[in-house]
Image (cartoon, grey):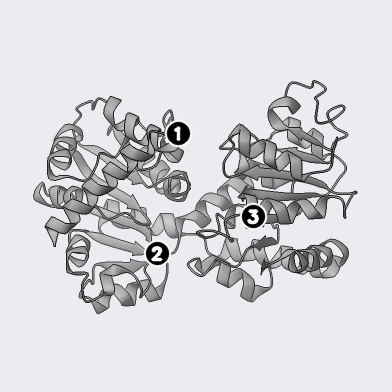
Amino acid sequence: MLLFYSIGVHLYFVTIWLASLFNKKAKLWLNGRKRQALVCCEDSIWFHFASLGEFEQGRPVLEEMRRIYPENKIVITFFSPSGYEVRKNTPLADFVYYLPLDTAKNAREFIDAINPKMAVFTKYEYWYHFFNEARKHGIPVYVISGIFRPGQIFFKWYGGLHRKILSFVSYFFVQDERSKQLLQGIGINNVAVSGDTRFDRVWANAQLPKPVPDVAEFCSGHKVFIAGSTWPEDEKLVASLVTEHPGWKFIFAPHEISEEKINKLINLLPINSTIRYSLLTTHLPTAIGTQPGVQQTLIIDNIGMLSSLYQYGAIAFIGGGFGAGIHNTLEAAAFGLPVIFGPNYAKFKEAHDLVALKAGFSISNQMQLKGIADTLINDEAFYNAASKKIQVYVKEHTGATKLIVNHIVTGD
């Protein structure tokens, strides 16, 4: 089985190489790994994140470990360019790298170079050679905010190699009891239910949000509908609300911000009603609006500021639910924003919880979106109840970071 795993890893590399000929993200993935030079260090603390979302999820633990072990170098790796490119200069790390392709040689050379005293992986990504090399060196590997589902390969009859990868992990901190039971069902008992560190991160952000003065000026005097991490399917639906609610302001923060994507979004919106954030900050008239402050719609054409924007919102639409799955609902929830999202949320426990609380709402078409948006906008009692319930839900689920860090540091 290890042979097939290795073949799969190399086939993935070939696929990325071919895609890099015409895909910018694939090119970044490839060239970033080619160009990086590892700096040797001793007793580093290694954090790995698949992408930007996992970085934000694991950030509370990262910050605590930075505080507790100020003498140790912090090494961060990312698998995806969308994480690396945004956080490659984070002050929370001494070194930030792309995770090399998972081969025995790469794993050996990488771990020999950074010499970690421990490795912390957030939520998922289980790499055979990196985990095995850590085991050989006696380096504990921790998985935090892990979540497991019965359909995953670990729990299939043919998942022997992947179960072996799990056996290399020193300790699992999982989000829910079901994940713990699934692991125990395959003989893995070094597991505790800690909850999800995202709650700690989003709650802390909501208590002391970073102000964005230009956005505050844009929103001044209006209630705001924020569409976060949207894809074209989401944007077509939300755009239909703009003319129906002229007293509201709308902010779109697309998941992808290429010129082509931004221009397609602009074309969905009423003429002369929209301004891009990059033009808003210059306070100049634009071809797609008149003067800053009079437009109804703002398009965020950068990455990394969405979590700060929710402080100005009243309702949020979270993108991704018409594709691979919804993005982060909790960033908006921590500010008390009722959240709306598409139908693909099966893999997200918090989304199920929010739907059950009637503080999160799944829609499948424009009519359903209009119905729930109109209710939230026009029924004050319904809105206030949803807003209060969603904020209480986030607060009640904080505390995972303290449990995880205490175990890692003390073993308790």
Where does residue 143 sit, x and y in percent of width and height?
31, 56
Identify the image quadrant of residue 67.
top left
Q: Is residue 103 above or below residue 258?
A: below
Identify the image quadrant of residue 374.
bottom right
Q: Amino acid at mark 2?
A: Ser
- Using residue 102 as the reference point, say whether residue 283 is left or right of it: right
Q: Is residue 412 visible?
A: no
Q: Which residue is under mark 1?
A: 24
Label 2 – label 1 distance at C-alpha: 38 Å
- Using residue 347 as the reference point, say whether residue 249 is left or right of it: right
Q: Going from the N terminus, do you reach mark 1 or mark 3 first?
A: 1
Where does residue 124 sit, x and y in percent of width and height?
35, 56
* Disc 2 secondary structure class: loop
Query: Which quadrant is the C terminus positioned in?
Result: bottom left
Q: Which residue is under mark 2?
A: 194
Q: Is residue 25 above or below residue 343?
A: above
Residue drawn at (34%, 30%), measured in percent from left and top?
Answer: 32
Q: Is residue 394 above or below residue 183?
A: above
> Which is more foreground, mark 3 or mark 2?
3
Q: Which residue is under mark 3?
A: 233
